[in-house]
Amino acid sequence: MKRAEKRMKYHKCINFLLSIGAQNIPHSGKTFFQHCVNVYNLLRKTNFSDDICYAGLLHSIYGNDIFDVDFKVERKTIKDLIGEEAESIVYYFNSTSRDQLWKEKKPNIIPILVANELDNTFLFKIIENVFDDFTVDKLYGNYRDFRSWNFTGSGSDNNHRKLNIKLKKSNKIDKILFDKADEIIEQNNLKQFTTFRRAYASGYTHGTIHDLHCDDGAQSFNEIFTVMFYLNKEWNVNFAGETVFHYAQTETVDSILPRPSRAILFDGAIPHLARDPSRLCPELRMVATFKYQVGNT
């Protein structure tokens, strides 16, 4: 399909959504129209097929067990807009329960499920017991005793002063973390949506600085996904050192202690910071961070 034809097809779908009043229907903190466009854009920038992208654009047009709405639209109308294959995806998406769709994990359905969920709620998961005790000891001993840390952020005007190591997949200890980060991405159905960007370890002592920030300059959700591992073997609540996530709209925070064998998967656009350890902490607070860019660019 030529570029002009693609643009025309897209604009016909947009005009159709506006004609049925999608812009006036609330959906997950936005309008149904905006939600449909967001799902389409997320699928498009990750290079899914035209059929999947257009099915994503009209994914809930028939109503389903989650989004109970009846636009009284004939299937022929949708087929004429997006084609028979894309319409068949839409029809199956709406005629099958959401739980069943997740269980089946059909390759032409799961991208729409994931894109839909990412637009409905921001990504934030705490994952416990990521490593067994032997691996926890191995990681802790390696990064504490056998690696050369670099100090970054010198200067009074710098808002990030910490110790840092660039992680490399060629290092057999680093590779344990690389493999686990990729596994977490895949387990959460994000592999097709992301491209690995960079990885590093950070070390903090009392008095280090790490101001509130978004990862890699993310300005909106679904741009950067981050996997963070806590590398210390033990951690006492009196040591402080929490990772704090700040939600400006509600003026609330999530405060996550750096417990052993714990990981966090989150959207890099959530403002966050690392609290420095307290004076009571005899340890270097160590984390390993893996950044994934949303989109196959």
Image (cartoon, rainbow, N blue to C red):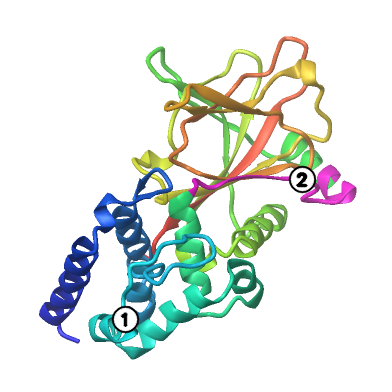
What span is colored magenta in the figure?
A: 121-137
Seen at 18% across and 77% down, the residue is 9
Nearest the viewer among 57 and 198 is: 57
Indicate the position of residue 120 as horizontal and vertical percent values.
Answer: 46, 51
Quadrant of the image occupied by residue 176:
bottom right
Indicate the position of residue 283 as horizontal and vertical percent values.
Answer: 76, 23
On the rendered image, what quadrant is the C terminus found in?
bottom left
Q: Earlier in the sequence, mark 2 or mark 1?
A: 1
Reply above or below: 140 against 196.
above
Within 10 Å of disc 1 (Cα), the crowding (few <14, some 14-19, many 20+) is few
Indicate the position of residue 250 as horizontal and vertical percent values.
Answer: 47, 25
Q: Residue furthest toward the top?
A: 279
On the rendered image, what quadrant is the N terminus found in?
bottom left
225 to the left or right of 278: left
Q: Can see residue 259? A: yes
**Which residue is tagged 2?**
128
Q: Which mark is residue 104?
A: none
Indicate the position of residue 10 as horizontal and vertical percent values.
Answer: 20, 72
Q: Residue 266 in magenta?
A: no
Q: Residue 123 in magenta?
A: yes
**What whole-number distance in Å separates the C-alpha atoms at marks 2 and 1?**
47 Å
Residue type beneath disc 2: Glu
Seen at 53% across and 80% down, the residue is 107
Residue type beneath disc 1: Glu
Marks 2 and 1: CB-CB under 8 Å? Answer: no
Seen at 66% across and 25% down, the residue is 242
**Which residue is tagged 1?**
74
Within 10 Å of disc 2 (Cα), the crowding (few <14, some 14-19, many 20+) is few
Q: Which is in the foreground here, disc 2 or disc 1?
A: 1
